[in-house]
Image: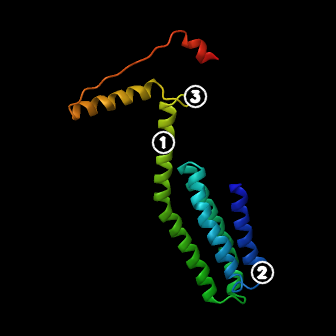
Amino acid sequence: MFAGAASFALAQLAYALYASGDLAAARTTIMEVFYLTLTVLYVAAHLVFDSRNALRISLAIYASGIVLVLVRIPSEIYGSLSIDEVSWLLRMHAFMGRNRHCLRPVLHQRSVKAEAKTIHRLAHLDQLTGIANRRQLYSEIQKETEQAARYERYLSMIFFDPDHFKRVNDT
């Protein structure tokens, strides 16, 4: 789905640059479709993929857009395209590059937090039942013991060990 969205955005940019003929009239399509979709793709890449792959993918999409623009510019400089249109395209791509660069630390921090949360969940919960495991029990005991000592309170624990629980657990 991600590859389809990226391909769609790049195809729309290519159409706006090459097939539409008048680049000035294609500004709206470029702004509304390509640059907006590009920003969404940057965010989605960091939410879907790990940080390293998200960076590679967003750079590849950005570079593909730049290549499409740079290939179009020489033919237009000698044709009907004004220097203002060329300048606008280059400024917009620079702006999108800055957006990608500014979004990266925020998105990277979110993905690191999500990975840490996933690792913690895998380490402290039973995969089958979703119930806290022994590691989580020890963490909770440690936390409660420290809290009782800090506030100078008594702490009591009751453990249950039902007989023949393995049969219940197996079924």
Q: Which residue is mark 3?
A: 129
Q: Amino acid at mark 2?
A: Ser
- Element type where label 3 sits in the image: loop
Q: CA distance from mark 3 to mark 2?
A: 58 Å
Q: Check the image and tell me how it is coloured.
A: rainbow
Of 104 and 168, which appears nearest the observer? 168
Q: Is residue 159 above or below residue 68?
A: above
Q: In the image, residue 67 lies at what x, y percent? A: 66, 69
Q: Residue at x 61, y 79 (%)?
A: 89
In this picture, is 3 found above or below 9? Answer: above
What is the secondary structure assignment of the residue under circle 1?
A: helix
- Asked whether, in this view, residue 83 is left or right of residue 16, the answer is left
N-terminal label among 1 and 3 = 1
Give the mark nearest the N terminus, 2 or 1: 2
The reply to whether residue 156 is visible in this rendering is yes
Most extreme residue toward the left, as rendered?
152
Q: Give the position of the N terminus as an image quadrant.
A: bottom right
What amino acid type should be assigned to the residue bearing mark 1?
Answer: Lys
Which callout, 3 or 2, points at the residue further toward the start of the chain? 2
Give the residue number, with chain letter if any, for mark 1.
117
The structure residue drawn at horizontal position 73% and vertical position 65%, both measured from the top left corner, is: 8
Q: At x 27% / y 34%, what residue is drawn?
A: 147
Q: Nearer the viewer, mark 3 or mark 2?
A: 3
Above or below for 16 versus 84? above
Left of 63 or right of it: where is 140? left
In the rendered view, would you say 99 is above or below 82? Answer: above
Residue 140: assigned label? none
Q: Which numbered circle lies on residue 20?
A: 2
Indicate the position of residue 115 as horizontal and vertical percent values: 50, 43
Mark 2–mark 1 Cα distance, whole angstroms, equals 48 Å
